Amino acid sequence: MIDGLRLFCKFAFPPNNLHYCGSKELPSLINAFLSGNNSLENSIRKKIPSFEMAFPYLSLLARKNSCDFLDEKIVEGYWIGNNLIKDLKKKELEEIYFSLVNSNYLNKEAAEELISVLPEKTDLHHSFHVFLFHSLTDKTKGTIDFMDSCKISFGKVLQENKETKKLLVEYYPVVSVNNKLFLGEEIVKEISFFPEWNQKITKGSLIAFHWNVFCTPINIQQFNSLKKFTENSINFVNSIK
């Protein structure tokens, strides 16, 4: 499962490094692991339950598909999108949200508000969580900029600066018009990358990034999947506003 763990870590590191989710001990371990220290695999795996939402979602997807929660296709489905995340039942999500009641993450009122608007079936993509949680309930409500950073963004590399460890990328931001969310026109943005992760970056490469940090190169199929599932999540949230 090391490839699935590696993919998970690429997407989980940026918010973990900002102390938004996951154990505070993990950023240094994840960075070392992604830089080539595979001996840290078991140590990191044991701490993944500290990701309050990602772990329950991955566990649910794993049960649905009868595999390990760090199966590479499960991890890819959650962060990027594929057929393994489709048609999760409302009751299954209810169980997750109620399990978080009275925790530091979610209270009873917020859980009930979220559950009240759930469709009978949904695609359990990371963007579904981002837009549902951060545009609906006051407990976890976020700004447009917060949601834009929290979603997995997809774009194209325009320029790489190895000295500053920055990439210039073109991507679709989340915008709000008349209280509705949309993917806006492409804009240019500067993000960070970690050269020690030893990932190939070239001008014109399609990439995914999270919290303004480059996560991984993606192919055109993954690019289109990420765009489709993100738009589906936005459309759902717009429909319940």
Image: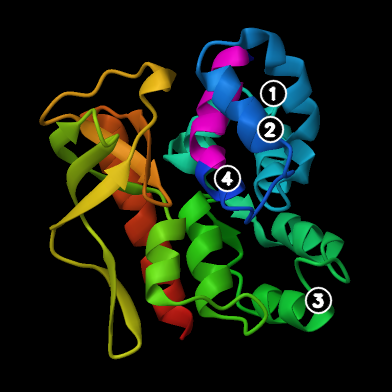
> Image point 72% across, 44% down: which residue?
24
Q: Residue 138, relative to residue 171: is it above or below? A: below
Distance, label 1 to label 3, CA atoms, is: 30 Å
Q: Could you say whether the residue bearing mark 2 is in a helix, strand or loop?
A: helix
As for residue 5 lying within the magenta part, the answer is: yes
Distance, label 1 to label 2, CA atoms, is: 5 Å
Mark 4 or 1: the one toward you: 4
Q: Would residue 98 appear left or right of 139 to someone viewing this image?
A: right
Q: Residue 155, relative to residue 148: is it above or below? A: above
Q: Could you say whether the residue bearing mark 3 is in a helix, strand or loop?
A: loop
Query: Residue 12, percent across and down?
Result: 56, 40
Q: Quick one: label 1 or label 3, which is nearer the N terminus?
A: 1
Give the quarter of the image for residue 143: bottom left
Give the quarter of the image for residue 204: top left
Check disc 2 and give the amino acid type.
Ala
Please tell me which residue lies in front, 137 or 92: 137
Q: Residue lying at the far right in this picture: please name it.
A: 102
Q: Could you say whether the residue bearing mark 4 is in a helix, strand or loop?
A: helix
